[in-house]
Amino acid sequence: MPTFPATIAYFSMEIGLDPEIPTYSGGLGILAGDTLRAAADLGIPMVAVTLLHRHGYFRQRLDEHGQQHEEPATWHPEDRLEALPQRIPVSLENRLVHVRAWRYWVQGINGWQIPVYLLDTDLEENNPWDRHLTDYLYGGDAYYRLCQEVILGVGGASMLQALGHDTVITYHMNEGHSALMVLGLVRQLCGGHIPERLTPELHEQVRQRCVFTTHTPVPAGHDKFEAMLVQRVLGEPAASLVLQLDGQPDNTLNMTGLALSCSRYINGVAMRHGEVSRDMFPGYPINSITNGVHAVTWTSEPFQRLFDRHFPEWRRDNLYLRYAINLSPGEILAAHTESKRQLLHEVTRRCGRTLDPNVLTIGFARRATAYKRADLLFSDLDRLRRIVRQVGPLQVLYAGKAHPRDEGGKAIIRKIFSAAQVLAPDLPIVYLEDYDMTLCRFLCAGCDLWLNTPLKPQEASGTSGMKAALNGVPSLSVLDGWWVEGCIEGVTGWAIGEDGSRPSDPAREAASLYDKLEYVIAPLFYKRPLAFAEVQRAAIALNGSYYNAQRMMMQYLTNAYAACGAIGNVICPVVPVPSGPSTPNCR
């Protein structure tokens, strides 16, 4: 199989590899999967590490009142992955936990493949508790989470060595969960042991090997562990080393601080997110590389066929999507009508509801949590009824899971169910349970309008609107995350509110949302369908051609991995060699 010595190792707690492999919870994992798919398309010499998550995130079940119930998302890795014979030990509380890896191959468009190693502790030689360490994504208490992050970071670095990946130059940490990877790197640089103290030379050698992408624009979202717990789990001198490295003044291990301190290149995931991150962590040179989505994965079959007819090069070079500007509005409408028909058929199959294909259909699908404000649409129910009566009918499709411990997120789902009962039958609202990659493909392609209402400035990027844009679905969104860059008012979609730099004002934003629906979007959809199709066309040509993972990976190559040139389809990243002695001081 076409592959090559990996020079980049990509670490992520979750990766969305396949709809049948539930090793992701939402946007972070889907982005990680899109990153690897684009890297394989480009022939980037990369390897990836994550955890197996035998019981996944969870399966969501919703009762008639919208109360969420969680069930294990159990799957069988032996049906889809290749078990590898190598075993590595990881020390937790002075006991050895044995770890193995399963391999999944990400297939690129030209046949190149990237190996992904999913770490697993379910081995007979481990005690019963340790065997479950790689079972649940974001499960358990702080102790469970820290042990998982040791397995991912320290165990991942050791596993790459055991598997013969000795050509890795750059280690890319996708969010702070994998920051303990620096311990594994220190051990490699110091001949297999952890030194008593960190010298400036050793710290710099670690920094020169690491890249860090942060995704969280609020302090509460960054993993922190009490110093006593860190000392208990890691032991000495490892605990003192990472507590010294995290650069934060409190008596905790801040995983984001550890990654920031140990990385030569750091980036947020949108222009605005980079600004927010620099304010949150002053003193660090945080850049921005705006997220993108894997175009072929998220473009519906009807639009794939349309693009193939007019500019087939789009599959290997997503910039050709710019040529969608030359498609006729009639062609756009025909492809979208087919995508919408497929979505509504799927809605009927899943929940028995039949929706009208001629009605303006609004989609909202993302994690159910307070700052996403899925309920902003219901700020004024009388106003919604008036829009339906005076301008034209609406129907709304929702999807999204709340974390099992996020009671605020669960309450929002119940509020949507309650609003649906109050507004029926004037405005049909359907909440589709168990949101996953498969359902995302239907929703992002088949809705007429993509709604996004985050509380500013808490949206790091957001990628569902990018998926929608590939399918000619324009966004109506608060100016936060990627939409600060992607919104050209009335051309690629519409903004909720006027100023993306100011904090959210819920009352003003709700009024803006209703005004755009009542006076701009619904009249355009019902009275000027060809003009609406022109907005759909611009969403593809302007946003689809740019907010894709291929462009994103080229920016990582140029800026983060410091690309040195190309050999055929293989791009060779290098890092600058630090000055000073080649062997670090590891006393």
Image (cartoon, rainbow, N blue to C red):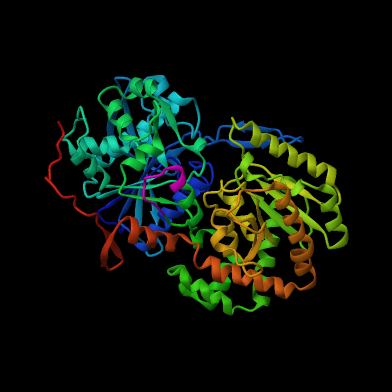
Q: Residue at x 31, y 38 (%)?
A: 181
Quadrant assignment for the C terminus: top left
Residue sticking out furthest to the right: 389
Rendered location of residue 2, percent (x, y) = 30, 59
Q: Tell me where residue 82 appears, x and y as whole percent.
A: 37, 43
Q: Total of numbered circles in the picture?
A: 0
Left of 574 or right of it: where is 113?
right
Q: Which of the 4 image quarters holds residue 37?
A: bottom left
Q: 198 or 568: nearer the eye?
A: 198
Residue 322 included in the magenta stretch of the image:
no
Is 483 above or below relative to 202? below
Query: If the image is split into quadrants, where does the N terminus sit?
Result: bottom left
Q: Is residue 564 left or right of residue 225?
A: left
Image location of residue 189, percent across then percent down:
19, 39
Query: In the figure, 556 relative to 137: above or below?
Result: below
Q: In front here: 209 or 331?
A: 209
Q: Which residues are magenta?
A: 278-287
Position of residue 121 in the picture relative to residue 195 (left or right): right
Which residue shows up at 46% across the image and 37% down it?
Answer: 222
**Quadrant in which residue 97 is drawn:** top left
- 499 vs 166, left or right, is right
Q: Residue at x 64, y 67 (%)?
A: 489
- On the image, the x and y values in percent for residue 471 come to 60, 64
Viewer-closest of 357 and 268 = 268
Q: Is residue 86 visible?
A: no
Q: Quadrant of residue 467?
A: bottom right
The answer to whether one can see residue 170 in this image is yes
